[in-house]
Image (cartoon, helix red, strand yellow):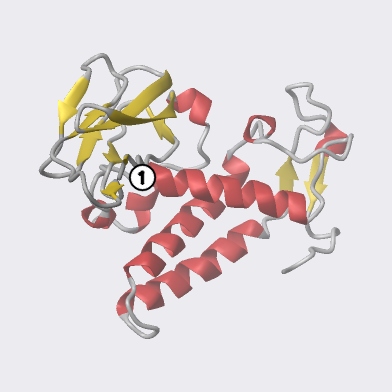
Amino acid sequence: MALYPVLKTEGIVQVDDQTRLSALSSYSNGGDSITQIEIDAGDGNGFLDVTSDRYLDVQYDSDGDKTVQVRLNASSTESQTLSVLTVAADLLFSTDRDLEVHEPEILRYVREGRNSYLDVHRRVQTLILDWLDYNRYWKRDNVRFEKADLIDIQDFKQWSTYYVLQIIFEGLSDKNDDKWMEKSAVYKQLAESARGRGTYRLDKDGSGEIDPDELKDNWSKPLIRR
């Protein structure tokens, strides 16, 4: 008979962004029942009793790696490392303000445990970097671009904004022809249009500057599509 603490976190969050540390999946395989659940957010406040809700919503006021722990019955413990980034280190291509330009009420639909869509912006950033890699936009040593290599994120802001809205409305939809799916389809088309912009400024040699030969002309380069 044993207790199994299970901790779920986002892995990466931004300073002052709300996130949920969840122990909802913790369980006992019989015998000993779970009578107490505690979570230590790694913010200096120690273990807090969350037996009733089984989760803890927090936001960090400093960056760095935080050791987050869940403890069952004051004995069985699981730990994870949660990375908290500053705005500058996160280097997201778009923000919630960009979303509100197109959808002023969009923050009404943020999921429980969060106060922003920064998690979706971060997911879209990864998808954009994956797309560049898939379509052979590489540095001079044929290594994929990382976010820090994209010096001028204005090249990607509109693409990211529309892509985030596409994903948000797709997630709100519960059938193929509701208003949310219609909105998602509109923003998907806008995202694809923004993706096909004329030029990307990519720092291929890691110099920190964009040289004339580092402008990627999308009109003359055939795109590889999935």
Left/right placement of residue 125 relative to residue 200 reads left
- Which image quadrant for residue 57? top left
Left/right placement of residue 98 relative to residue 30 reads right
The quarter in which the N terminus is drawn is: top left
In this view, the residue farthest toward the top is 44
Q: Residue at x 41, y 44 (%)?
A: 119
Judging depth in this view, the residue of 189 and 67 nearest the camera is 67
Q: Residue at x 40, y 33 (%)?
A: 13
Q: Position of residue 75 (x, y in %)?
A: 26, 27
Judging depth in this view, the residue of 86 and 113 nearest the camera is 113
- Which image quadrant for residue 104? bottom left
Left/right placement of residue 36 relative to residue 60 reads left
Q: Residue at x 28, y 48 (%)?
A: 27
- Which three-letter amino acid code belongs to the residue tagged 1? Asp
Crowding near pointer 1: few (<14 within 10 Å), some, many (20+)?
some
Is the residue 209 above or below the residue 50 in the image? Answer: above
The quarter in which the C terminus is drawn is: bottom right
Looking at the rendered structure, the number of numbered marks drawn on it comes to 1
Label 1: element kind: helix
In this view, the residue farthest toward the bottom is 177
Q: Residue at x 75, y 49 (%)?
A: 133
Q: Position of residue 44 (x, y in %)?
A: 26, 14
Judging depth in this view, the residue of 120 and 102 nearest the camera is 120
Is the residue 171 above or below the residue 206 in the image? Answer: below
Read off the residue under disc 1: 96
Q: Position of residue 46 (x, y in %)?
A: 22, 18
Left/right placement of residue 42 relative to residue 141 reads left
Is the residue 36 above or below the residue 164 in the image? Answer: above
Q: Position of residue 118 (x, y in %)?
A: 39, 42
